[in-house]
Image (cartoon, rainbow, N blue to C red):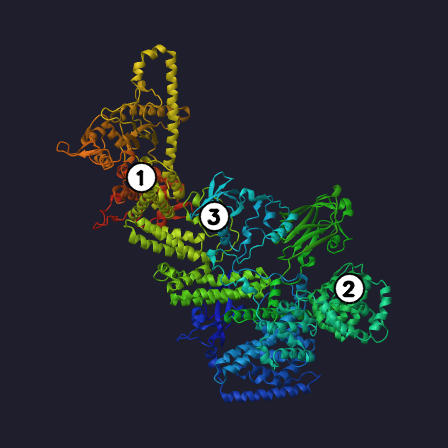
Amino acid sequence: MVGELRYREFRVPLGPGLHAYPDELIRQRVGHDGHPEYQIRWLILRRGDDGEGGSNHVDCKAEHILLWMSNDEIYANCHKMLGEDGQVIGPSQETAGEAGALDKSVLGEMETDVKSLIQRALRQLEECVGTIPPAPLLHTVHVLSAYASIEPLTGVFKDPKVLDLLMHMLSSPDYQIRWSAGRMIQALASHDAGTRTQILFSLSQQEAIEKHLDFDSRCALLALFAQATLSEHPMSFEGIQLPQVPGRLLFSLVKRYLHVTFLLDQLNDTAAEAGAPNSTPEELSGERGRLELEFSMAMGTLISELVQAMRWDQAWSRQGPSGQPSGSIFQPQPVDEGPGLPPAQALPSRRRSRRFRPRSEFASGNTYALYVRDALQPGMRVRMLDDYEEISAGDEGEFRQSNNGVPPVQVLWESTGRTYWVHWHMLEILGFEEDIENMVEAADEYQGAAVSAAVGTALPSWHWKPMTELYAVPYVLPEDEDAEESEHLTQAEWWELLFFIKKLDGPDHQEVLQILQENLDGEVLDDEVLAELGVPTELAQDLLLALPQRLDDSALRDLLNCRVYRKYGPEALAGQPAHPSLLEAQAQPQESADAARVEAKEAPTQGSSSPLQRLAEGFGPAGKIFLDLEGAFRSEGPRQGEAKPLLLQLQRQPQPFLVLMRSLDTPAANKPLHLAILRILMQLVDFPEALLLPWHEAMDACMACLRSPNTDREVLQELILFLHRLASVSRDYAVVLNQLGARDAISKALEKHLGKLELAQELRDMVFKCEKHAHLYRKLTTNILGGCIQMVLGQIEDHRRTHRPINIPFFDVFLRYLCQGSSMEVKEDKCWEKVEVSSNPHRASKLTDRNPKTYWESNGSAGSHRITLHMQQGTLIRQLALLVASEDLSYMPARVVVFGGDSATSLNTELNSVNVMPSASRVVLLENLSCVWPVIQIRIKRCQQGGIDTRIRGLEVLGPKPTFWPVFREQLSRHTRLFYMVRAQAWSQDIAEDRRGLLHLSSRLNGALRHEQNFASHFLPDEEAAQALGKTCWEALVSPLVQNITCPDEEGVSPLGWLLDQYLECREAAHNPQSRAAAFSSRVRRLTHLLVHVEPCEAPPAVVASPRPKGRNRSHDWSSLATRGLPSSIMRNLTRCWRAVVEQQVHSFLTSRWRDDDFVPRYCEHFSNLQKASSELFGPRAAFLLALQNGCAGALLKLPFLRAAHVSEQFARHIDQRIQGSRIGGARGMEMLAQLQRCLETVLVFSGLEIATTFEHYYQHYMADRLLGVGSSWLEGAVLEQIGPCFPNRLPQEMLRSLSTSEELQRQFHVYQLQRLDQELLKLEDTEKKIQVSRDASASGRGRERGTGEEAELEAGAVAAAAGVAGEEEEDESEDLYYEGAMPEVSVLVLSPRCWPTASICHTLNPRTCLPAYLRGTLNRYSNFYNKRQSYPALERAPQRRLQWTWLGRAELQFGDQTLHVSTVQMWLLLHFNELKAVSVESLLAHSGLPPDMLNQAIGPLTSSRGPLDLDETKDTPAGLLKIRDGSEEPRPRRGNVWLIPAQTYLKAEDEEGRNLEKRRNLLNCLIVRILKAHGDEGLHIDQLVCLVLEAWQKGPCPPRGLVSSLGRGSTCGSADVLSCILHLLGKGTVRRQDDRPQMLSYAVPMTVMEPHTESLNPGSLGPNPPLTFHTLQIRSRGVPYASCTSTQSFSTFR
């Protein structure tokens, strides 16, 4: 029922706002695999047409697609077409009730009545010949029409007598009888498409039907066909100018089309009867083979005639063949450069290297990236190809290094003067400096350079792939397999050759069959044997040599264009676009015996200089027929004998006739030529054979002559007489004239000549009466072309479903023309509606008369001259040009400006400005516009030599060349998308029922893609069509499949995720190539490689550059690697699935292994295995590396806070141990460095996570111990450079920077002491007496000390912490004398507590009480130096800082032959033994004020086996007594370096300090929520929020100072900590971003302040830690309730 949609449960998107719905089951058949198939009609509805609003009604047959579907596809897509038992409801079950409504006896009586009525109607029709039809005859036909509308009686009307009756009625001159016949045919055709096709086909196949039907009867039958087929294939060719097809040729096309549709219905009916019990399989197979051959031959004939009717063969001969698609049709071509513009022209004066290949030579960006990675070496010059953050395209630099980070390439860029990290595919290799040459990129030299490069180096084929991508395009056959030729013709090639054999008649046909029999052992060749014949290629070449001599002109042209001839034809003829030589050779033996008479007439003809003779000479040897025709029609005797051979020759070779007619479209000055041509044409019309000539193909030349205002009146009169005669003889050409607009042209001619044109009004009336026939012809042409396109699409669909070859001749030819387009060009008068000028409008027609001698001259002031073009709707200007003449002197334009607008009052957009040279004749103003401008205005701003008025000789406007490609592309896309989306849904249903079906998905996909690849290679003519098909297929098949297999089920696991999990589990077992695990892994890899191998190279959208760099260079935002160039839906779903798999794997590992002692090495190994698996599955693609990183980050985010802190501490400890272990050197040290590198790659995941804050905390402590204990090394800086993004506050980097500052201060201090010494020496020189008196005193002030008990030379180092509070008083400078080298070397490290963890782990050192005088003096002098440096004028604005000395640092002591490396505390302890033999530990504690654990930590190494001391415990000294060990007691090293610095002390996350970090995080969450709630829905900018939180943290009242002070070390807070908490709340949903302004944050959902319990990290604890409730007691405010995060179970990513 119209407007009723029965099945709407599944909709398939076919395009923007376009969907398809399954509507009705049409028919059923048995497929080639023996399973049933069902033809479903899918409705195509646009957005808003689905009836949901209740007011829209849809015509179910307006737009639809017929699709054959299997049981599985219907089960997956059309559930309501299934019965209760799950079986498909067939069409027979729906109509069974209606068929049984009539009793058999009643049907028999009605059939008898119908037969008697047919006999009566025939008798009455014979009696009324030549008279008015009687009423009984009309009544009888009316009753027959009523019977015909009853479907069970359809079989009676298939009787031959009914066809005879209809034929007589249609050929009757009376309109009512023809109308009654039409009603009966409509009634018969109203049942189904099969009956309609059979009735119309039976009528059209009647013998000599064209002789019985006159023009009106034929138009009546054509109207019935148009009405019957209008709803079958609704297709619009709006904007495409179809050629004018006369009714005779159109009727032939209708007959061919009906024949093809009839055979197609028979094929489907034969398939439907395959399961019938009364037919054997052999009989059905033979019948089906016969029908397939007949259908292929009929389809080839239809295509051949349609190509000639559409004049595509002429357009192809002019344009030449286009290149076949090369490469994978699913991988779009790179678009790095503009269309048609080589890189050399785009960027002049660029440098490049001849040794390395550019990106444009690679099929995908991934393969190019791998090539660059393998070829690039440190020190090479590179150029940036794309804009990336701070680096612009075109910047050059020097490649430094690469690693596994993201981005992986470090380059020193000349534009910025520093290094910056980029991606591989963004670089072009220039090579080393000696490889680079300056390339002169002039446009005139580009082609020569390209040719020389092509000769010198072979360009790579698209088959090149790196070894890591062996499965990149498995559906493409290798080149050697492509080039391989079989010894026999394929069935499609043989059937195409058989098509031409069947074209032969009589003896020629028998001769060709005789050749076949002789080469095939005399086998009897009937139609069944011919269809299945295997023909060797040698025999095919012999046949192709014999066929051209036996075919007529039309068939010969088809032979030369067919595929089998291009492949196996003789080399002398292959590849020739035209065939005049063959036709001439064919015409030579057919010359008549009167050749002597023709030669006798040649001499006088050559002696004259007539225009026709000049035309014949210009056309060449074939132009001789012009003179022959003129001579034949001038003779006074009977002309028939001379003219008929010439007409037969023109029928075989119509090119001279077309040239003759098209010569009318020449300038009006050729009046004698025009008159001569018209006289010849006028006499040609009188011959019946002349009506078979293609008059319609050159009728546009007659119309051009008729429209031209310069046509002479005599020529115009002769033209009108000729056209009237032609239209009178054949009214088909009156219809053609109507289509060409002859009525208006004749009216204008009558107007111009005041009606004094003979037969002009009659011709105009004749043309006007054919208006409805012209509309019918246009509609029929559209229906036939649309029907052929739909049948071609149906064959493509069957080809996809069955994978059987397409055996239709000229199938590739038809597709080539559909993809190539029409040959019509929009000329001037079809581009614009009207032309307006600023002055002298009566001369405006001179602009478009195409006569260079006439002109339009303006009248007005200088600069006011305008020409305004009102364009046809939707016309894109291809070229706009002015014709000028230099002879006009000052009237010639000098400057022209072109404007465009939507109307004449809004011409505000300047399109172009052109300066006209004085020697110009044709000035191009616009070319290839990309935007439609309804109004174009040309303004002449200045004339040559300062002229005022201007003259324009002509105006040329060319519009676009309309093609059929957009229409065919849309239809091909719809059918392809529907077919593959239905198939994808069925495959997804199978996978959902059994996940193991994923293992077969690779072979299924590979088969489908290989089929489309081969189809494009064989049938599609160019790259554009192939790429369009590939893109549609990929989006319709792969995209929904990937979406379905990556969608999680109820358990939260997707099918592909399950498969990848299985792959990871059996990865180790897959090393055995003979195991089942290896086969399983191979299938998984083939599937993943197939899904991700397509990488479009489309230009990425413009992105506004952010001032803050991202990625590897500063930030830790993994999202900076978004896959801009990749298919968004497929890649997004695949990466999301891989991320989920990695997250689950890492989370399981963290949950089970986080307490292990070797946790970090195991985690690094696990991460490395995941990296290897990612490379195996997806190749080295950044998108999946990003997914891997995000998956690991997601697993870390799921950890509770204290557990995450424990993990971060383990990584910091592991890095510390590997850095210290690398100092060992040798093989052990190299192994430590390798382990360190693996760990650093893993730690990069912390970048951007909240865990980075705790990781930085622990790393800072351990790094400080290393730097102060053993000193800095190159490894510290290298580690920080690689994992720098993992430190939000950048404290480790600041620590290294402070060490560099301390070294600079030490150098300045050395210079400062030298200056003081110089000053003292000057004083001594001035006062020699004072020097003599104070010599003793000065000698006693030297800074060298010796111990009393045992001599020891000491070199000590102290550490000073710079603080903002003054603590030390200046020492007396009376002993502040310095003599270089007189005392031990002392280095002072000035450490800032802002970046060094000195506040809580060290104690203040008092130099007065704890250090000897020679060390104390140096420290005093350094303090004075530092204070004086702080008082410089340039530093007055900076805060004044004083030094506080601490116990941190190290020292080297000389003890005998040993050099002891000790800490500052150990140095102070050992210096006591220079004066004492024994020292008690109690006295040391009392003297230093150090805590016992710190002192005991220093004593431990000194009393070990390597130390110099012994510890004795007595009753008097319970803490112990230290004394120097006697050398005889136990052996110890006697010389060399001895390291006695205390071992590193590692922290624990479960200690108080770790809990303080958690408390700080929760306090910050409370502050953020409170501030955001106070600002309501308007929210705050993120920068403002950070400032407010920091201010509240420092000033109060929330949180209270007492509470902050209770956090201890965790009380410090920075902006990075606040940002981390903000993103944590964003991830939990407490805070939200505004969609339009993501930098604005607001409060979203209230949450609980704090979880009541915090998880314990102690494995032995029996329960959770005590609840922390201080947050709710001390921070809540009465006015604004707020909340913090609910728990510490997860954090957000820090971006």
Left or right for 904, reference 669:
left
Residue ID for mark 3: 423
Counting from the top left corner in percent of width and height, residue 895 is at 70, 45
In this rendered view, identify the residue nearer to me: 1155 or 1186: 1155
**Where, by quadrant of the figure, is residue 88 drawn?**
bottom left
Name which residue lies at 66% across and 51% down.
Answer: 926
Residue ID for mark 2: 620
Please, what secondary structure does the residue beneath circle 3 have?
Answer: loop
Residue ID for mark 1: 1261
Counting from the top left corner in percent of width and height, residue 1224 is at 33, 41
Distance, label 3 to label 2, CA atoms, is 63 Å
**Where, by quadrant of the figure, is residue 566 drawn?**
bottom right
Q: Is residue 949 above or below residue 1091?
A: above
Counting from the top left corner in percent of width and height, residue 1016 is at 56, 64
Q: Amino acid at mark 3?
A: His
In this rendered view, identify the residue nearer to me: 534 or 1448: 534
**Where, by quadrant of the figure, is residue 1461 drawn?**
top left
Crowd tier of the residue under label 2, counting other residues whose Cα lies within 10 Å: few below 14, some 14–19, many 20 or above: few
Counting from the top left corner in percent of width and height, residue 1419 is at 31, 25
Query: Which residue reaches farthest front?
Result: 1528
Left or right for 1468, reference 90:
left
Crowd tier of the residue under label 3, counting other residues whose Cα lies within 10 Å: few below 14, some 14–19, many 20 or above: some
Q: Is residue 900 above or below residue 307?
A: above
Q: Is residue 440 above or below residue 21?
A: above
Looking at the image, is mark 3 or mark 2 earlier in the sequence?
3
Crowd tier of the residue under label 1, counting other residues whose Cα lies within 10 Å: few below 14, some 14–19, many 20 or above: many
Please, what secondary structure does the residue beneath circle 2 have?
Answer: loop
Looking at the image, is mark 3 or mark 1 earlier in the sequence?
3
Query: In the rendered image, is residue 774 in sight?
Result: no
Q: Amino acid at mark 1?
A: His
